[in-house]
Amino acid sequence: MLTFDEPTVPRVWTPQPFRVAERRPETADTVTLRLQPLDASGMTIEPGQFLMVYLLGIGEVPISVSGIDDDGTLSITVRAVGAVSRAICASTPGSVLGLRGPCGTAWPIVEARGRHVLVVAGGIGLAPLRPLIRAVLDAGGAHTGLTVLYGARTPADLLYRDELTRWAEAARVAVTVDRADSSWRGQVGVVPKLIATADVDPAATRVYMCGPEIMMRLSAEALIARGLSSDAIYVSMERHMECGVGWCGHCQLGPTLVCRDGPVYPYSRLAPLMEVREL
C-alpha cells in the first residue's frame, strides 16, 4: 500500500514551494528574487542549471539560477517579457513560488582548475554566469585568474552593478554598452570587440559564455582565431522550453533537446548549428 511518505512522482516533475525572501530591482524590467525553501530537503542545483518556476493559476517558465547560497537559498533574475515573467517579477517578500528541477546541464567548472577563466556575457546572460563567477572567486588560488567581459544595450540595462565593482577588485572586468548616455564614461560597442582586449593564453584558458547567439558565435570565432580550441569554450543556449526534461520537444535544436542535453554545451558541438542564421 502506498503512503504519502513514498514518492510516486519524480521530484523534477513536482514544484517545490519556495518563499520570496528578498526582491531587488536590477533594471526597469528586471528583478532578482532570493528564494528560501519551505521544504526542509531544499534543492541541490549547480551553476548553469535552470529551474521551471511555477506561479499558481498563471503558468510556468524556465529561468536560470543566478545565485546559490550555502543555506539552500536560491536566486533567480527575471526579465518581465510575458504574462508569467511579469507576474514573477511582481512577487513580493512572503510570496510563494513553485520551483521544479534542477533541469539541464551545469557549467563544467572543474575543467577550469589550474587555468584562467574567461567569462563572456551579454544582457541577462550574465545571470546564469553569476554563480560560476562567485564559485571561481570563492575558490581562491584554484585558478590562475578571472576575466569578465560583459555588455548591455544601455547603461540602464546593466545587471549587478555593485557586484561588478566588487568583482573588479579580484578580477579583470570590462564592461561595454551598445548605446551610451551622457553619464557613461566606459566603453561603447558590442561584446565581441572586447575579446581583442583580453589577455588570453590559448593553452591555459577555459571560456564560459551566455547571451544573444550572434554575440556568442562572434565571440567564439574571435577566440578561436586567437588560438583557442572550440573544446575549451562552453556556451549556454536559450530556447523555447516547456517541460524541462526533454519530453515535449519544443526546444529541439538539431539533434539535441536544449532542456535535457543543454543549456550548457561545448562550442565544438554547437558551432555547425549556430552558423545557420535562423537559429
Image: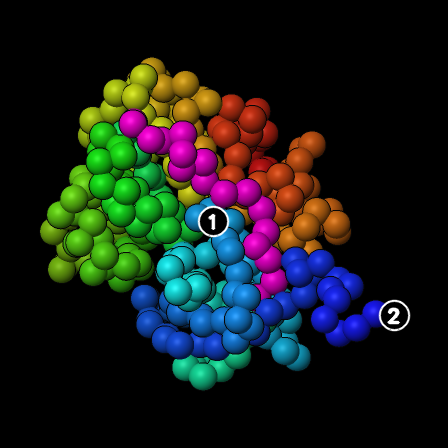
Report which quarter residue 107 is drawn in.
top left
Residue carrying label 2 = 1
Depth check: 201 or 121 in front? 201
Q: In the picture provided, is 177 more to the left or to the right than 88?
A: left
Q: Can you tell which of label 1 and label 2 is closer to the viewer?
A: 2
Depth check: 111 or 25 in front? 111
Report which quarter residue 119 is drawn in.
top left
Disc 1 residue type (three-letter): Glu
Whether residue 114 is visible: yes
Disc 2 residue type (three-letter): Met
Q: Residue at x 55, y 42 (%)?
A: 105
Q: Which residues are magenta?
A: 99-115
Q: Is residue 169 above or below residue 88?
A: above
Residue carrying label 1 = 46
Magenta stretch: includes residue 29: no
Q: In the picture provided, is 148 more to the left or to the right than 123?
A: left
Q: Position of residue 253 (x, y in %)?
A: 65, 38
- Mark 1, Cα crowd under 10 Å, few <14 / some 14-19 / many 20+, is many
- Mark 2, Cα crowd under 10 Å, few <14 / some 14-19 / many 20+, is few
Colour setup of the view: rainbow
Report which quarter residue 73 is drawn in.
bottom left
Magenta stretch: includes residue 111: yes
